[in-house]
Image (cartoon, rainbow, N blue to C red):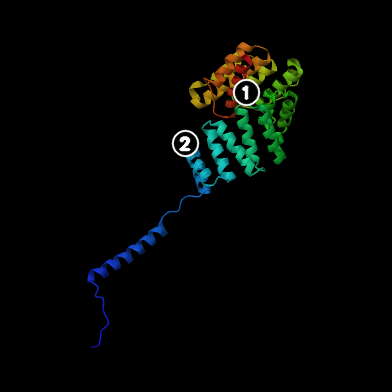
Amino acid sequence: MTRRPHRFILHPSSFILAAALVAFAATATVRAADAPKPPTAKELIAEAVAASKKGEVNAAYALAEKAVTLEPKSPDAHYAFARMCEERRDLTNALAHYSRVIELDPKSPEAFQFRGTTHFKLGQMTESIEDFDQFLELVPSQKPHHWQRGIACYYAGQFDEGRRQFEMHRVVNPNDVENATWHFLCNARARGLDRAKDELIPISGDDRVPMKEIYELFQGKGDEASVMKAAGENREKTSPAEHRNRMFYAHLYLGIYAEARGDAKAAREHIEKAAGEFAMTHYMGDVAKVHLQLMKKEKK
């Protein structure tokens, strides 16, 4: 008897199952292709910067931190995270990440500049000046502009170097009362108060309130009352932020001038107001805070 080959008989449901599996596989492939790719470190940095501009400090910090985690050897990621740390006043962490940028990219002028300002905010003047000098080696054209270096020299006790820095700054910023006052302060410590008055840099045209009255004070022609009156004038027409800023500068420079004259009590009272009641978030606001920290340290 001839043996017929065995045939498998498939149930119709088997065809349905196979078709479903093929369709599922095809759909999964499409979904995988359409799924959004995770952001790169560069994209996270851009998002962090955008969030920072909107004032979303914590979100910016988290995004920059993710960028560092994603690309731990990226100088840009560490730089962005350091900047966000600074915004949150996490200065020690900021310092560490600026240092990491410099390890990865020793020719990064921005990292030296901002590590220098961070050292300053932490009261580390010698390190601050060293970083500023490294920045200026990389970007020598910025030396006349670098007033922050002059202020750091003042607090480091390098009064002649500070005086020279402010004399250079005068070339690029001739009508800045603050430059004249810091030159005065360095000169007073290096050469005496009378000579500092005689060599006060001539200024005209600084229309910020109350800079005119502050300049007259340092000239020996004005007084505390005139500075405070100017700072408080037109209160009803001045925004709260601008009024606060004016009062901050009035107390900062009244305090510093009082200290130059040897009036420690008045100096402390004004600096405490500049660093406390009228504290500002800009760089000179940090100068007031540093000044108060150094006063407290000196008193101890």
Residue appearing at x 46%, y 39% in the figure? 59
Which residue corresponds to the image point at 54% horizontal and 19% vertical from the top-left?
232
Percent x, y of residue 20: 29, 65
Residue 202: horizontal and vertical position, in percent?
Answer: 72, 24
- First in residue order: circle 1 vs circle 2: 2
Q: Position of residue 82 (x, y in %)?
A: 56, 37
* Vertical placement of residue 23 versus 157, above or below: below
Q: Residue furthest front?
A: 1
Crowdedness of circle 1 by 10 Å Cα count: few (<14), some, many (20+)?
Answer: many
**Label 1 sits on what residue type?**
Met
Circles 1 and 2, Cβ within 8 Å, touching? The answer is: no
Name the quarter where the N terminus is drawn: bottom left
Q: Image point 67% across, 30% down: which residue?
A: 127
- Under circle 2, the secondary element is helix
Q: Which residue is mark 2?
A: 58
Say which quarter of the image contains residue 108: top right
Task: Identify the residue position indicated by label 1 in the image.
Answer: 211
The answer, for residue 252, to whether it is visible in the render is: no
Q: Which kind of residue does numbered mark 2 sit on?
A: Asn
Q: Is residue 277 left or right of residue 30?
A: right
Residue 27 drawn at (x, y percent):
35, 62
Q: With 28 as the anchor, is 228 left or right in this view?
A: right
Q: Quadrant of the C terminus?
A: top right
| Residue 23 image-quadrant placement | bottom left
Q: Is residue 85 above or below residue 234?
A: below
Q: What residue is at 51 percent from the left and 46 percent from the top?
A: 70
Q: Secondary structure at mark 1?
A: helix
